[in-house]
């Protein structure tokens, strides 16, 4: 094929799966080519989508993009335009979408118009305004792509992290200002807010008779402790989850605090200061931070990526044929005078279950704890550890919450209580993406409904994560 040539392929989503099976062959013809893949609907009925919002997927290098598309949304056209370079990341996305469209139950009906080529970002700039651009992939330079989408008049739903370096904070602030001026919605995917346990935790924290006021704590005994463990080898939607080789390049993906740390900071700030704006320049003080690697052998790397050898980009972190993957970190900081200690870690594979999170919030009347260890069968549970006589107040609040969370109850476990949450009302990790997307689309319909604090709190969150990484490198 001549470099710079155009090739148009028309394939159904079954064909997308076949394309994925031949990823090596199609990868060889990608150099300089512009390839458009349209995925026609099986039905002969014409599409009537002009009144619906268009979804625009940009360089989907992470499976979170497909989790947004696990279901259909009445506000969104089934026709999705995809802009990406032709390569393994795009092929993985097409393969996952093919599985959603042909699954036996609750099949989706996405119709993909894929523009693959090195000029994909230029094509994005020609998009008509009003659509929703989704970014889920490479994190270095993501803010530049976000700004390009906003300049085209597109709303933006970005997987975390939006930025991984403190030098990009002004760019993020400029993007938020641009979105506000153009009445566009810019948000990152904080799906954890929609978990049932998180909402119950927030309801108890806001009850003065149960929690009291937050305890500021000290450097040695912080008022808030947050930790999360993620796993490199995992199963997503019933299948082993591959990872691209660039995922292990921390200059591309970001270090642990800059990546998964975003979720923990978001939860902590939302819990401590519900419905309150934070000033990223005045309210945050980072006290200390550190980082350390998780060793990844070549055989483990090969299992996750399919690559037979180490890429040259990873050479700075290879020691005796083992990758020192700098994905673990700890930060101590103060937010409006409250001491917070946060730790993120990546291990190889979970003993049982999936990613785990733990939390402790100290109040003047009780401590609220989230645990996810062997005693909890590796699923998150909410505990109340009283420092005062709050039994009656706790029972009252749980009774009030039963109308919106049917079946919850207070269980006595020695000197503490556990809030029993029925399986029927627990929301899985994958389902939270649909819940968050529905809320995002409601804001797209009415941009004024997006709380103003979301913009300032987005900056405060990334001030912590990127600032912590910078300090940990010293």
Image (tube, rainbow, N blue to C red):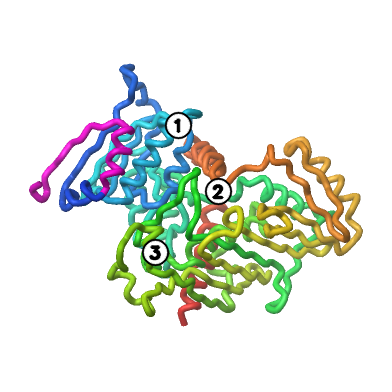
Q: Secondary structure at mark 2?
A: helix
Residue at (40, 56) in percent of width and height? 243
In this view, which residue lies farthest toward the front? 299
Q: How many marks?
A: 3
* SS class, disc 1: loop
Q: In this orientation, does residue 77 appear?
A: no
- 180 or 167: which is nearer to us? 167
Residue at numbered disc 2: 191
Sequence order check, earlier mark of 2 and 3: 2
Give the Cα separation between the discs numbered 1 and 3. Answer: 30 Å
CB-based contact (under 8 Å), mark 1 and mark 2:
no
* Pointers 2 and 3 in contact (C-beta within 8 Å): no
- Most distant residue in the bottom direction: 474
The residue to which callout 1 is attached is: 103
Q: Earlier in the sequence, mark 1 or mark 3?
A: 1
- Classify residue 261 by image quadrant: bottom right
Q: Nearer the viewer, mark 1 or mark 2?
A: 1
Of 139 and 294, nearer the camera is 294
* Horizontal relation, residue 297 to residue 315: left or right: right
**Mark nearer the viewer, 2 or 3:** 3
420 part of magenta stretch:
no
In the depicted structure, whether residue 48 falls above or below residue 152: above
* Residue at position x 73%, y 58% in the image: 375
| The stretch drawn in magenta includes residue 3 | yes
> Mark 3 sits on what residue?
301
């Amino acid at each position: 094929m001549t470099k710079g040539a155009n090739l148009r392929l028309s394939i159904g989503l079954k064909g997308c799966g076949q394309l994925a099976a031949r990823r090596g062959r199609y990868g060889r013809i990608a150099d300089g080519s512009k390839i458009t893949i349209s995925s026609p609907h099986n039905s002969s009925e014409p599409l009537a989508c002009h009144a619906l919002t268009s979804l625009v997927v940009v360089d989907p290098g992470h499976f979170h993009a497909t989790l947004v598309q696990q279901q259909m949304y009445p506000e969104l056209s089934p026709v999705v335009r995809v802009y990406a370079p032709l390569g393994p990341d795009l092929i993985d996305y097409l393969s996952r979408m093919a599985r959603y469209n042909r699954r036996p139950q609750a099949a989706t009906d996405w119709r993909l118009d894929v523009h693959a080529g090195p000029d994909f970002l230029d094509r994005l700039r020609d998009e008509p305004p009003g659509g929703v651009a989704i970014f889920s992939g490479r994190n270095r330079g993501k803010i530049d792509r976000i700004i390009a989408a906003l300049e085209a008049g597109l709303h933006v739903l970005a997987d975390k992290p939006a930025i991984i370096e403190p030098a990009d904070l002004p760019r993020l602030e400029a993007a938020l200002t641009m979105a506000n001026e153009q009445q566009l919605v810019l948000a990152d995917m904080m799906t954890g807010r929609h978990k049932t346990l998180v909402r119950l935790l927030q309801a108890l924290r806001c009850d003065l008779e149960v929690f009291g006021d937050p305890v500021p704590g000290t450097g040695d005994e912080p008022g808030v402790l947050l930790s999360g463990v993620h796993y490199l080898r995992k199963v997503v939607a019933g299948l082993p989850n591959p990872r691209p080789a660039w995922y292990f390049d921390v200059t591309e993906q970001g270090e642990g605090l800059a990546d998964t740390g975003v979720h923990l900071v978001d939860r902590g700030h939302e819990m401590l200061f519900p419905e309150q704006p934070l000033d990223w320049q005045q309210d945050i003080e980072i006290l200390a931070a550190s980082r350390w690697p998780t060793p990844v052998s070549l055989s483990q790397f090969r299992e996750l990526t399919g690559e037979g050898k180490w890429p040259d980009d990873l050479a700075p972190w290879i020691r005796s044929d083992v990758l020192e993957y700098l994905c673990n970190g700890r930060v101590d900081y103060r937010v409006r005078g409250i001491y917070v200690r946060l730790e993120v870690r990546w291990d190889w594979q979970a003993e049982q279950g999936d990613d785990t999170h733990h939390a402790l919030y100290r109040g003047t009347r009780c401590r609220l704890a989230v645990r996810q260890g062997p005693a909890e069968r590796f699923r998150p549970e909410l505990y109340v550890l009283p420092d005062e006589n709050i039994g009656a107040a706790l029972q009252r609040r749980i009774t009030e919450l039963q109308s919106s969370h049917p079946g919850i109850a207070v269980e006595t476990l020695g000197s503490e209580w556990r809030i029993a949450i029925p399986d029927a009302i627990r929301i899985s990790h994958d389902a939270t993406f649909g819940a968050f997307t529905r809320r995002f689309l409601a804001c797209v319909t009415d941009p004024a409904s997006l709380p103003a604090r979301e913009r300032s709190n987005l900056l405060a969150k990334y001030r912590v994560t990127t600032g912590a990484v910078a300090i940990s490198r010293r």
